[in-house]
Image: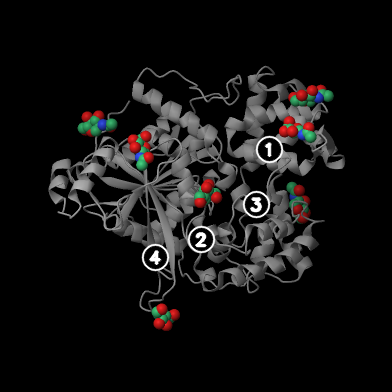
Amino acid sequence: MTELVMDEKYTSRGSSWSRQKDLRPKNHLIVALFIMCCYLSFYGWSGISQAKDGPNYFEYSDENINWKPCNNSNSLPLECSSIKVPIDQFDLEHPRNETFIIPLIRMRGINATQNLFLNPGGPGASGFDLLHRRGEQLKAIIGEGFHLVSFDPRGVNNSVPRASCYPDERTRQELSRVRSLDVLSDSPEVFAWAKNFIQACPDTMGEYAKYLNTPQTAADMNDILDALGQEDMIYWGFSYGSLLGQTYAGLFPERSKRIIIDGVIDQFDWYGGLFEAQSLVDTDMVLDGFFEECVKSGPERCPLARMAATKKELRGKVLSSMTVLQDQPISVYINKSIHGLLDYEKLWFNGVFPALHKPSMWSELAHNMYNVFQGNATDAFLAYGNQEAQKWRHEAFEFITLNDGISGPEHWPQDRQTFLDKIAPLFNLSLFSPVQSKNYYLRQQWTVSRTHSYVPRKNMKTAHPLLILSTTYDPVCPLIAAKTANEAFEGSKIVEVSGYGHCSIAVPSLCLAKYVRAFLYEGRLPHTYTQCEVDSPYFHESDKSGQSSPQRVFEDTEEAEIHLAQVLLADGWDFASAN
Ligand SMILES: *[C@@H]1O[C@H](CO)[C@@H](O)[C@H](O)[C@H]1NC(C)=O
Ligand SMILES: *[C@@H]1O[C@H](CO)[C@@H](O)[C@H](O)[C@H]1NC(C)=O
Ligand SMILES: *[C@@H]1O[C@H](CO)[C@@H](O)[C@H](O)[C@H]1NC(C)=O
Ligand SMILES: *[C@@H]1O[C@H](CO)[C@@H](O)[C@H](O)[C@H]1NC(C)=O
Ligand SMILES: *[C@@H]1O[C@H](CO)[C@@H](O)[C@H](O)[C@H]1NC(C)=O
Ligand SMILES: *[C@@H]1O[C@H](CO)[C@@H](O)[C@H](O)[C@H]1NC(C)=O
Ligand SMILES: *[C@@H]1O[C@H](CO)[C@@H](O)[C@H](O)[C@H]1NC(C)=O
């Protein structure tokens, strides 16, 4: 393993003894010492003192906010806080009363003096969930040299106010359902549905509606940095987090010291393009990868391989079986209270599409599909048949994408048929293109005005070049977008994992983890375009216990730990919520 040494800057800033001297005398020093003892074993001695907000709160001498412990059920040592940010970060000359409250969460690193920001994507995925569910594995991959910080961006989950187009959850469940996946026959319905939706959103959010966008969130990240007393942005953003990272780097290049973007979105398309069609250019390649790896693995590991001898033949058989399912859904009867239908849309869009993001689901998908094609849809129905209409209890995704991008009547024909003729060609780009259908109707009709003036630029020079991560075939964030970012940010370098899935973390690769550490700790980038191998097979014997287990043996203890963390992350990451 490459020797990983911490860069001068990060070790010299605030050694434990200089920190201890910083400790300001406080009235409650005794209590503070007590609290310190509780946290010492995890947090180390780093200038903790009790804060005035109450006995559960504490603060660090070089920060401007208070924290309180917020362990989850796994007893991970987490601390939580929040900051208030102005409703309009780009008009501070006219201060307003309205603010957003942004919750913060942090997992401390034993040897850390700097904070690394993480964003799980979406837009709309919660940084709280990320650290609660996956913090332990991210920590194992990154090492103890950074505190991991995440947050619920404005509008998301526990931020206040939350982005919403409905007065309550019950109304959301009732009114949010609309059919859109059959792009031609569902068009009249989704067109009419969108008309109500785009009215309900500003009705629900009032003044706040137009300030839910990515440039505002990028500026909020500076307020968080300032509250943490840190000058440099150190960041790893996944999927939509790559768009947030590029936006941050574009707006604040001088603070962009260590920016990693992973599973890249084309920011020029996002802010300035009518169509997002490019995002699906590699989707069907991932499906082909599924077939190819299946045939290679053989029927023992991939039951679908019983149906064909080559990738091409398998593809043909599966697609024609899907057509049969399109004509005739299969009924599944479990008992008198659980029964229903497995139809084409459930299998294709709830089963296959999410699995393209996440190869750890391939074995199960192959098993379920094979059984469906043999006439038994029970397992597939149980796995894909009962999905909730809404993945989140908020509409941050809609507000942010629509406010960021080219939306509204001035950009789109308002007549339904003219509009449909314009978007129709997009739907034969990929077998999965219909997933984008609904959002086009929202773009067409959205009336909230744009409040940011961010325009992505080429030849951006940042404080330190960006590290860009991608798989070879990503179903929603294709490699071509990573190349576009590479051209836009001076000196940036791409590390490509030679595999399938959404973001580098979709598959374990120790090689990738080493590049990430070298970049974070030493600022080191590979000299040229670099590829890393995947460390595990796509189809493996199913582990009866349901536990994730190492896929390869590494002699070195640390390498073995990183590998296991990557396997767990690839199995557990909730890509359904990280678009
Ligand atoms: C948080 O978790 C750590 C590690 O398990 C534990 O030592 C600590 O006591 C916990 N704190 C609280 C307040 O539960
Ligand atoms: C802000 O709040 C203050 C106190 O509540 C109020 O007097 C003032 O009118 C508010 N200003 C605006 C612009 O809403
Ligand atoms: C913390 O840093 C010290 C000194 O560099 C090192 O010896 C130790 O192994 C590190 N601890 C962890 C948990 O990384
Ligand atoms: C949002 O916050 C709640 C806690 O209030 C948490 O239980 C939930 O998992 C979070 N995430 C999402 C996506 O709702
Ligand atoms: C139906 O099956 C489900 C799942 O196996 C079970 O939880 C439920 O109790 C059953 N209901 C009846 C009425 O048998
Ligand atoms: C269908 O599959 C389920 C689950 O694998 C199994 O329990 C059931 O017996 C199968 N039904 C038939 C008719 O083979
Ligand atoms: C895509 O759609 C256009 C217009 O709807 C059609 O003319 C073309 O043949 C389609 N291409 C493919 C590859 O299906």
The residue tagged 4 is 85
Say which of marks 1 and 4 sits in front.
Answer: 4
The residue tagged 3 is 390
Whole-percent x, y for residue 265 in the image: 52, 51
Residue under the image location 66 percent in, 36 percent down = 287
Amino acid type at mark 1: Val
Rendered image: mark on residue 155:
2
Do the residues bearing badges 3 and 2 touch, measured as CB atoms within 8 Å? Answer: no
Whole-percent x, y for residue 61 in the image: 21, 52
Q: Is residue 66 above or below residue 449?
A: above
| Mark 3 or 2, nearer chain start | 2
Q: Label 4 neighbourhood size at 10 Å, few (<14), some (14-19), many (20+)? A: many
Q: Is residue 421 above or below residue 377?
A: below
Q: Nearer the viewer, residue 243 or 399?
A: 399
Colouring chosen for the image of the structure: one colour
Amino acid type at mark 2: Gly
Residue under the image location 41 percent in, 49 percent down = 150
Do the residues bearing badges 3 and 1 touch, measured as CB atoms within 8 Å? Answer: no
Q: Is 257 situated left or right of 545 in this image? A: left
Q: Secondary structure at mark 1?
A: helix
Looking at this view, name the residue that lies furthest to the right.
328
Residue under the image location 35 percent in, 57 percent down = 224
- The answer to whether residue 294 is visible is yes
Whole-percent x, y for residue 85 in the image: 39, 65
Q: Quadrant of residue 423?
A: bottom right
Rendered image: mark on residue 352:
1
| Mark 4 or 3, nearer chain start | 4
Q: Secondary structure at mark 2?
A: loop
Q: Label 1 neighbourhood size at 10 Å, few (<14), some (14-19), many (20+)? A: many
Q: Label 3 neighbourhood size at 10 Å, few (<14), some (14-19), many (20+)? A: few
